[in-house]
Image (tube, rainbow, N blue to C red):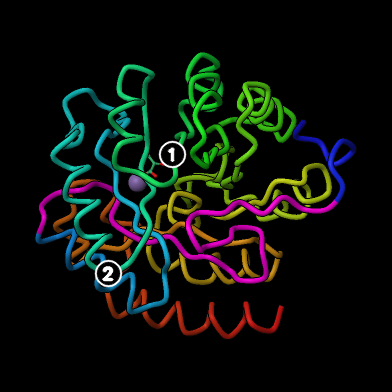
Amino acid sequence: LTSREFHPGNSIIKVGDIEIGGADFVTMAGPCSVETLDQMMTCAKIAHEGGAKVLRGGAFKPRTSPYAFQGLEEEGLIYLRQAADEYGLKVITEVMDEANLELVCKYTDIIQIGARNMQNFRLLEAVGKTTKPVALKRGISGTIDEWLHAAEYIAAQGNSNIIFVERGIRTYETATRNTFDVSAVPIIQKLSHFPIIVDPSHGVGIWDIVPPMALAGVAAGASGMIVEIHPTPSEAWSDGPQSLNEKNYLSMMKKVTILSQTM
Ligand code: PEP
Ligand code: MN
């Protein structure tokens, strides 16, 4: 169901009046974690100003340490939705388990499956039973073949609104948080009819390396990107080092817009 062989043409994923996989490059921007309503309002304003159409923000956070901030849960979903609505943006947020799927679906337009859950097959089946678009992140050590099969778990349950997200993979390299695999863009496009977007933030983990990798994603033909921004990255509750401040996000978006229009 995921393979190109079974589906002529490209699948376009509709989120309201936004099309992912269509003619326009779609940017999803926002903080790693939802922190406060004020922070979300500021992020939504900045995201919108740069041309993003979707607001991101984690309310359930899959942190490496169990002692790190785990997310505001429903309170965070409320802030995220409120801020997005204020600026006419759609919402993308992560669901970590089946138990919270219904709750997350109440607030979000796009369900994000995190890298750590790419092979959580019961969760994939559960989101496959919904009608919401699903952004499926590539697993931390996920091969392209494993990623395609993960998407198949979603599609097999009847949900054919899938968006692949390249977010970097673990390699021997330590200079970046992950190794951003931009070649995944044309490879997925060759193998699947579903669109692929890039996540340069988690792809590299270093804020000043994010803009060139975002542009690389555009040049590779990605249908969009998801990027982390924060009003004051040094004070972010998670992923501050890879988050762009307003000025850097807006200057990146100028270039992204110009390049994507020439593609
Ligand atoms: C995130 O988007 O903040 C996140 C946790 O991403 P990933 O699952 O790619 O690590
Ligand atoms: Mn993050």
Q: Is residue 30 magenta?
A: yes
Q: Residue 34 placed where, x, y %?
A: 20, 48
User: Can you say which quadrant of the picture contains the C terminus?
Assistant: bottom right
The residue at the point 49 percent across, 29 percent down is 130
193 is higher (above) or lower (below) than 61? below
Give the side of residue 36 with respect to residue 140, left or right. left
Dot 1: within a 10 Å radius of its alpha carbon, few (fewer than 14), some, or many (20 or more) residues? many
| Circle 1: element type | strand
Give the side of residue 245 with respect to residue 190, left or right. left
Dot 2: within a 10 Å radius of its alpha carbon, few (fewer than 14), some, or many (20 or more) residues? some
The residue that label 2 is drawn on is 87
Amino acid at dot 2: Tyr
Give the side of residue 175 with respect to residue 248, left or right. right
Query: On the image, which quarter does residue 142 sit in?
Result: top right
The residue that label 1 is drawn on is 111
240 is higher (above) or lower (below) than 192? below
Q: Residue 107 placed where, x, y %?
A: 29, 42
Q: Residue 247 placed where, x, y %?
A: 29, 80
Q: Is residue 254 magenta?
A: no
Give the side of residue 139 with respect to residue 144, left or right. left
Q: Residue 33 placed where, x, y %?
A: 24, 46
Specify whether tag 1 is near ligand 1 (CB below 8 Å): no
Mark closest to the chain's N terminus, 2 or 1: 2
- Distance from label 2 to label 1 (Cα)? 20 Å
Please give the range of residues in magenta. Answer: 9-37
Specify whether tag 2 is near ligand 1 (CB below 8 Å): no
User: Can you say which quadrant of the picture contains the N terminus?
Assistant: top right
| Circle 2: element type | loop
The residue at the point 70 percent across, 25 percent down is 149
Q: Nearer the viewer, residue 91 or 226?
A: 91
The residue at the point 58 percent across, 71 percent down is 215
